[in-house]
Image (cartoon, grey):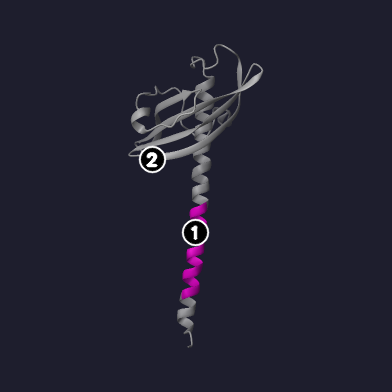
Amino acid sequence: MRIMPDKLFFCIIVSFLCVFICIGHGFANENDYQGMSMKFSNFLQCELTRVDAPDYFNGKAFKITEINLFDVKKEGDLTIVTGIVKCWVVNRFETLFAAVGVKQLFGHEKVYYLLIQKQDFSVLATQLEKYPYKDRCAWSRYSLDDVR
């Protein structure tokens, strides 16, 4: 059986297109992950260190050493972002667990819900809605230090 040159050419073109689409999709996902990770990190850094922030460590001085994004899931129009914040408190490490509920508002992402606690937890949108967030820190991939 002989393969026609035009069919062979068509198969090669389709194969290249499939490869480029898959590679492009992989880069988009990496950029999405990096962007979400930066937004999560910048938001929690701001929220935990602002002047009137809740006191999670009973008045002890602390330094944020690491912020890790664990998961991003969609529930309706709400994006739930979860992760941890590792802090050096006096002479030991302590971990805070965080869940942030983000919605689109006129094409911009805005934090609507925030839950931070010392115990690990899993959260659904209906549970997170019990913790509304008053707009104090921006949900942005750029920290204020980068702008200066």
**Residue nearer the viewer, 121 or 135:** 121
Residue 74, numbered circle: 2
At 43% across and 30% down in the image, what residue appears?
Answer: 100
Give the distance between the C-alpha atoms of the residues marked 1 and 2, in whole angstroms. Answer: 23 Å
At 48% across and 87% down in the image, what residue appears?
Answer: 2
Tell me where the magenta segment starts and ends, as one range: 11-26
N-term mark: 1 or 2: 1
Q: Is residue 23 magenta?
A: yes
At 49% across and 59% down in the image, what residue appears?
Answer: 22
Q: Amino acid at mark 2?
A: Lys
Q: Main secondary structure of the magenta part?
A: helix
**Residue nearer the viewer, 3 or 88:** 88
**In this figure, which residue is indicated by the disc labeled 1?**
22
Q: Amino acid at mark 1?
A: Cys
Q: Is residue 125 left or right of residue 22?
A: left
**Residue that protrudes farthest toward the top in the picture:** 59
Q: Is residue 103 magenta?
A: no
